[in-house]
Amino acid sequence: MGRIKLEEIDTRAPGALQKEQVKLETAGIISELNELQNLLYAESKHSVLVVLQGMDASGKDGLIRKVFGNLNPQGVMVHSFKVPTAEELGHDFLWRIHKNAPAKGMIQLFNRSHYEDILVTRVHNLCDKETAYKRMRAINDFEWLLAEHNNTTILKFYLHISEKEQSLRLNERLDDKTKQWKYNESDFAEAKLWPEYRKVYEDCFEECNKIPWTIVPADQNWYKEYIVAKKLKDALSALKMRYPGLKKA
Ligand code: ATP
Ligand code: MG
């Protein structure tokens, strides 16, 4: 497969799709996810890691609420990765990540992830190119380790919004009282670095594709939710899980 070029990928749903129809379908998928999650937890043979990446205001929080909010909280964990603390910086970059990898039976969501250690760090020149490539190799090995040694199904999503949509959402953060808490002083400055972010994202898609990425058109929440819910349902269904039956004495 050639290099993914984000500028060539639509940020909106295919025109023929009917929003209401898709929303109904998503609701059906979410109730199936409930059953599949129960099975995942009961069988406790597999684990699932959902990696969510995207520019500011790409809708990671809303996605977590809408797609995962109805699942059994006992079986879902969310971790949001922020700027590393001094303690975290004293370790290798995967230290804080590995601690949050899912146990068998669990679905773990990463709201941002180990990819930030390439993205934000490269864009701001906090690490050199060689280090970034070394990290990408380490990420490939790490993801493979989880997949091979903890039966972890890893789903990596890039929430793909347009610069225009991002600008609308960031301005909403300034104006809407219920969203002001999300506003970050650096949001508009970061948005100006879009071309730099795009390039590093494309590098990640290219170098870290042993476990593939899904680029999710994310300007419309209903379509983004549908794509992620469907991917998760298909991945869980493919595990061919079975209820374990009575425990042996
Ligand atoms: P939103 O998309 O809604 O803006 P967010 O994920 O940006 O939410 P914030 O609390 O606004 O959440 O910001 C978290 C910040 O932490 C991001 O700017 C991100 O780039 C930064 N961050 C995460 N991991 C790292 C890392 N390894 N190194 C440096 N910065 C990081
Ligand atoms: Mg932010």
Image (cartoon, rainbow, N blue to C red):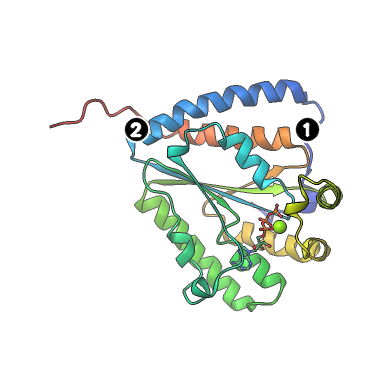
Residue depicted at x 66% and y 65%: 119
Mark 1, residues whose alpha carbon is within 10 Å: few (<14), some, or many (≥20)? few
Q: Earlier in the sequence, mark 1 or mark 2?
A: 1
Residue depicted at x 45% and y 32%: 37
Question: Dot 1 lies on which element?
Answer: loop
Q: Is residue 229 left or right of residue 57?
A: left
Amino acid type at image mark 2: Ala
Question: Dot 2 lies on which element?
Answer: helix
Amino acid type at image mark 1: Pro
Q: Name the spot of residue 76 as percent of width and height, x first.
A: 47, 41
Locate residue 134: give its quadrant.
bottom right
Residue depicted at x 62% and y 61%: 204
Residue 50 seen in render: yes
Q: Is residue 94 left or right of residue 64?
A: left
**Nearest the eye: 204 or 62:** 62
- Frontmost of labels 1 and 2 is 2
Which residue appears farthest toward the left when viewing the image? 249
Kindly indicate whether the residue at mark 2 contacts the one at mark 1 (C-beta within 8 angstroms).
no
Q: CA distance from mark 1 to mark 2?
A: 37 Å
Q: Is residue 13 left or right of residue 104?
A: right
Residue depicted at x 38% and y 52%: 148
Q: Which residue is mark 1?
A: 14
Q: Name the spot of residue 198 as percent of width and height, x first.
A: 74, 60
Q: Which mark is residue 42?
A: 2
